[in-house]
Image (spheres, rainbow, N blue to C red):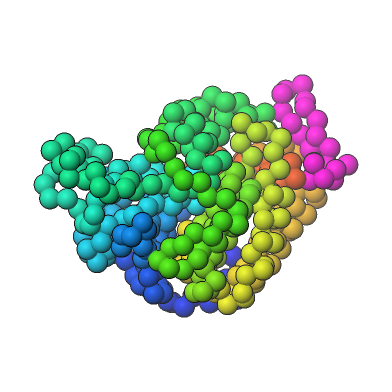
């Protein structure tokens, strides 16, 4: 949902955006890349951090974009023009969602065993060195994926099946919360390949990031801040020296972060986890420059956290009022929580978010939940 109080935030770069295949300097050793997405939310921000790892000069990439020919081509343009002739040393993913992890396998394969720059000659289908080059690259370590263990393992599972994004289980789950439109349910069943299509392969190995870890990137310490609710174990990165926060999806300037319940954990309470997680960012300096995954870099972190809390307080109050008026299911709350027309992709996220608000209130004891004879859960005021 759009932020009605966005004017309280400040965008240091104004309306300036990096064009596809280009990178903008944001701070010393920090570059901003922007890739397209085939959704209403049509972009993701990705970050290049100047680095030195195991005695080698190069770059760390934070988040990857989805697996698509367009995204790969844009990355190749970035590599050719914006790495100063240096290699990518490692890839970090804030969490497992497709726009953040989709090309992790390609990127790590693309840069493993390379001292600097792209190799000469044709690449393999995965972007790695040609078979004749194997002997020349053994002295250089692999380009490793770094992320939380929870999200890494969930990504491995989801890339070979699906997790809450589509398929028969997701359709049945949404049906149990009142989504009965046959066409929508058929389309959700048909989306069983939603995650594997955008994350076809996950790297076989990774290095674990955990809350409180300090990672040296380019001679500066970046502290890991784990957040919950949007993803199982989302990792944001904070650099105190530069007062920079790579917030991932945990704090976005213009829209509220999606917080959903999915079929694999139907009684989950991600909303309360998310709201609790926001408190961790209040300890950061008020003038921190936030580098979000969607939208533009901004200052006003504390104000944005207040806005997000207020937004969810208002939504929760609307849910309670609706359930007090009559027993209500999640699908029935969509017009209450979302004032605009939703396409199918947005509907699946909206259903997950509607259930999240109901579960938060139910698990607090503010609502009762009953399963009707029609197999649909309805919630009423306690």
Q: Is residue 324 left or right of residue 222?
A: right
Instruction: Give the residues drawn in magenta, as a range.
Output: 361-382
Q: Is residue 380 magenta?
A: yes
For image coordinates 75% across by 45% down, the residue present is 360
Q: Position of residue 196 (x, y in %)?
A: 41, 34
> Is residue 179 visible in this depiction of the protein?
no
Taking the view exactly as shown, the residue that stands out farthest to the top is: 373
Give the residue displayed 43% in from the left and 68% down from the top: 219
Q: Position of residue 264 (x, y in %)?
A: 61, 31
Left/right of residue 180 with respect to residue 309 in the rendered view: left
Quadrant (top left, top right, bottom left, bottom right) of the N terminus: bottom right
Residue 87 visible in the current orientation = yes
Question: In the image, residue 78 lies at what x, y percent?
Answer: 27, 60
Measured along the vertical axis of the image, is residue 177 above or below residue 295? above
Looking at the picture, does residue 165 appear above or below residue 319? above
Q: Quadrant of the C terminus?
A: top right
> Residue 348: x and y, percent?
55, 40
Q: Nearer the viewer, residue 317 or 322?
A: 317
């Amino acid at each position: 949902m759009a932020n009605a109080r966005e004017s309280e935030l400040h965008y240091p770069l104004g309306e300036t955006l990096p064009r596809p295949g280009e990178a903008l300097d944001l701070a010393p050793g920090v570059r901003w890349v922007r890739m397209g997405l085939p959704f209403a939310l049509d972009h993701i921000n990705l970050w290049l951090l100047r680095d030195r790892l195991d005695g080698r000069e190069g770059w760390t990439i934070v988040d990857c974009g989805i697996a698509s020919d367009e995204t790969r081509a844009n990355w190749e343009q970035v590599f050719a023009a914006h790495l100063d002739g240096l290699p990518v040393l490692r890839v970090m993913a804030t969490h497992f969602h497709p726009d953040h992890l989709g090309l992790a396998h390609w990127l790590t394969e693309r840069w493993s065993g390379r001292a600097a720059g792209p190799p000469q000659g044709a690449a393999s289908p995965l972007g790695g060195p040609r078979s004749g080059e194997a002997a020349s690259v053994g002295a250089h370590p692999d380009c490793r994926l770094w992320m939380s263990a929870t999200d890494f393992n969930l990504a491995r599972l989801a890339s070979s099946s699906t997790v809450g994004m589509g398929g028969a289980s997701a359709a049945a789950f949404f049906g149990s919360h009142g989504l009965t439109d046959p066409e929508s349910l058929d389309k959700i069943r048909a989306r069983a390949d939603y995650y594997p299509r955008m994350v076809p392969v996950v790297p076989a190995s990774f290095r674990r990031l955990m809350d409180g870890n300090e990672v040296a990137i380019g001679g500066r310490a970046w502290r890991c801040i784990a957040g919950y609710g949007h993803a199982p174990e989302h990792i944001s990165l904070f650099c105190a020296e530069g007062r920079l926060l790579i917030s991932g999806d945990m704090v976005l300037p213009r829209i509220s972060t999606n917080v959903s319940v999915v079929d694999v954990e139907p009684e989950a309470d991600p909303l309360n986890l998310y709201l609790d997680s926001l408190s961790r960012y209040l300890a950061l300096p008020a003038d921190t420059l936030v580098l979000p995954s969607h939208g533009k870099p901004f200052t006003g972190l504390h104000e944005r956290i207040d806005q997000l809390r207020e937004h969810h307080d208002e939504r929760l109050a609307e849910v309670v009022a609706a359930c007090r008026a009559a027993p209500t299911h999640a699908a029935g709350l969509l017009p209450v929580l979302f004032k605009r027309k939703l396409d199918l992709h947005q509907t699946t996220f909206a259903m997950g978010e509607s259930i999240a608000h109901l579960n938060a209130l139910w698990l607090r004891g503010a609502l009762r939940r009953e399963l009707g004879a029609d197999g649909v859960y309805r919630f009423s005021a306690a």
